[in-house]
Image: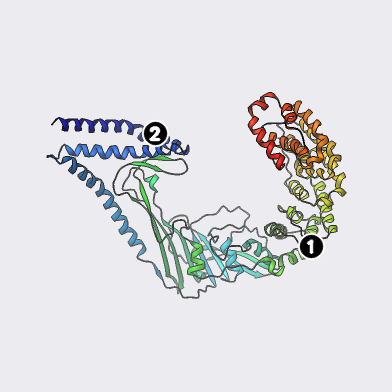
Amino acid sequence: MAVATIQRWTFRTVLLVLGLAALPCLLLPQIAIVAAISIVGIPFALLMALIPPVFLFLLLTWAISFGVPGRLNWLTSPLIAVALLAVPPFLINRSMDRTTMALVSGDNDRIVRPFRAETLAVRSDRTAFWTKTQTRCDDFCMRALLTRSARRIMVMSYPAEMPEPDFSSIARTFHMERRASCPPVELADVRLLDLEKSPTARNAPKASERMRLEIAKGNCLIESEAPLAEADTVVSAGQIKRGVNDYQAGLNPTADTIAVYRISVHNKDGATFSEVYRWTGVASYRLLPLLLPSYVTGYQFDIRIGFPRTLDLTHIVQFADRPDWSAFVTGTLGMELTLPAVDDSNDAAAVLAAKLSQPGPIDAVTNSLANDFFDRLRGRQTASQPDVDLAIAALNERRLGVPDSVFAAAKYAKDVAPESMARLADALFARLFEIDIKVSKFGNIEAPQAGRLAIAIQSLPDQVIPEHRADLERLAKDTPRRVAAFQALTRLSVFGADAIPTMLYLIDDAALQPLDKGNFWQHSYLAGVQGLCRLGERGAPAIEPLLERIRAGIIPLHASYGDLAINTLAGMGADKDTLLQAFPAKDRNSNRARFDRVFDKARRKIDCGY
C-alpha cells in the first residue's frame, strides 16, 4: 500500500513538472526556433516539441485512471487513452482517402497519337509578372510556334477553379506570318508554364532569342484575339481545389487540407468540346496516428501549436511542379520542342550584320539581337575572329545601345589578330567618352553603359592598353565619368611604376569627395588602390607614400578595405612589422589575428578584389 502511494505521488509530481514545463512550450514556441537556429540548441528545441504531447497524454491517462477500477488500471488507462486519441485521426484520414479516390477515379487518356493540333489553346491559373509592353507569348508559346508543333497558340488564364471550356470565351492568340514589316514586340523568357525540366529545354537556346531571329528575317509574331471556339484542342492546367497546409490548419483537426491539381485535354466535337484526357494529382496533409498537439512550422520562421501532419501525395512527385506541365507536353503529348542551336547555321551573326548595314532607325528587335550575340559569347566563353569583327561593328554603330555582356568580346577573344583587338579597344574607349554621364540630385551616377564599357576595357589584353594612356589619364581627371567607369582605371597598372602618381592622385582626390555623395569616394578610391595592387613588386616605390596615407587616415582599414590595403602593400614587398606599426593602435590590437592571416596569405597570392 505504501509503495502504491509513493508511485501515485511520484506520477503526480512528474505530471506537475511536465505541466509547468509545457506552459512556456505552448505559449512561446518561438523559443524553439531560436534554439534550433543556434545548432547546439537543436536537442532543446526537440525537447520543447515533445513536452506538450507527452504531458497531455499522461494527463489524459491520469484522468481515465479514476474511472478504471482494479489493480491493472496502470495498463488499461494508457490503452484507453491511445484508443481515444487514435479514433479521430483514423476517421478523418479515412474520409480524406475516400475523397482522394473519388477525385482521381475520373482520370482517362484517349489522346490520339501522334498528337496534332492546328490551333492549340492553353488555359492556366498561373500568373506571370508581365510588364505592360511585353508580348504575352511565353516560353512554351514561342517554342510551339518555332518548332511548328502548332500553327496558332491561344492563351487564356482563369483566376479561380478551372472552368469548363466555353466556346464564347475570348483568348489571346499568336501565330507567325511572313510580312514585309513586322509589328513591334517585346519578348521575354517568361515561363508561365514551365519547360525548364524538359530534356528538350536543357542547353537549348532561349526561345526569345530564336524568335527574334525569325522576326528579323521577316517571319513576324502576330498577336490578336479570337473566341475559344476556333481552337481544335484545349489544354487546361492548374489547381482546381485549394486546401490549407498543416501550419494553417493549426489545432483544427477537421480542416480541409486537400489540394487538387489537374491537367485536361478537350477536343472540338461539333459545337462542344469533349474531354479526351484527364490527370489529377492530390496533395493532402494527413493527421498522425494520435491526435496530440505539438509544433507545426510555416513560412521561414513561422511556428505555432497545432496537430502535426504528414504530406501525402497521389500521382505527384515530391519536388515536381504541380501540375508538371513540362512532363505533360513533352512526355504525354510527345511534342518536340527542341530549338535548333543558334550558332549551327550562323544565322545570328548574318542577320545582325545585315541589320547593321541597313540605314534608318534601329528597332527594338535588332537591339535585342545585339544583346543576344554578346550573351552567346559570354555563355560559350569563346570569341573568334568573325565574332570580334562583328562586336567592333556593333560598338561602332551608335544606333545600338551598349549590351550588358559587351565584355565577352574582349575577355574571351581567341586566335584574334592583334590589329582587331586594337580596333576593339579603340571602339570601347570611343564609346566610353561619348556617353552622357548624369548625376542625380542625390549624387548618384546614372550611367550603366559606362560601367559595362569599363568592365570590357578591364578585360582587354595588356598589349592594346599602351595606345590609350592618354585616355586613361583623361578618365582619371573626369570625376563623374571615372566614378561610373572606375574599373577601367585599374589598367593603369600596365604602365608599371610610371603610373603610380596617377593612382595616388585617385586616392588623394577620393579623400576630397563627400562620403554621402553616391559612390564618388568609394569608386575613386578603389580605382587607385586596386590599380596599385595590380602592380605587385613593380609598385615598391609606392610603399612609403601609402604608409604615409595610412598614418594620415586617408586609407580606410576596416573590413574589406583593410584587407585590400594589406594585400596591396604585401604584394609590393612591404615589411610586415613596418606595415603593422603604420596601423593605428586600435586597429593593430583589435584585429591582429586578421592582419596576420591576410598578410601571410597575400605573401603567397595577392588578392586585389574588394
Q: Which mark is residue 371?
A: none
* Picture layout, residue 533 above or below residue 222: above
User: How many residues crowd around disc 2 within 10 Å: few (fewer than 14), some, or many (20 or more)?
Assistant: some
Which residue matches tag 1?
A: 385
* Picture layout, residue 535 above or below residue 553: below
- Residue 570 image point, x, y percent: 74, 36
Q: Mark 1 belongs to which amino acid?
A: Gln
Q: Look at 63% across and 54% down and name the residue there.
A: 133
Q: Nearer the viewer, residue 5 or 54?
A: 5
- Residue 230 image point, x, y percent: 52, 70
Q: Look at 29% across and 39% down and name the residue there.
A: 54
The C terminus appears in which quarter of the rendering? top right
- Residue 251 image point, x, y percent: 33, 42
Q: Nearer the viewer, residue 43 or 464?
A: 43
* Picture layout, residue 537 above or below residue 415: above
Q: Quadrant of residue 212?
A: bottom right
Q: Mark 2 belongs to which amino acid?
A: Leu
**Disc 1 versus disc 2: nearer the observer:** 1
| Label located before the other in sequence (1 or 2) | 2
Q: Quadrant of residue 11?
A: top left
Q: How is the image coloured?
A: rainbow
The N terminus appears in which quarter of the rendering? top left
Total count of labels? 2
Could you tell whether 331 is left or right of 286 in the image?
right
Q: Nearer the viewer, residue 225 or 464?
A: 464
Which residue matches tag 2?
A: 28
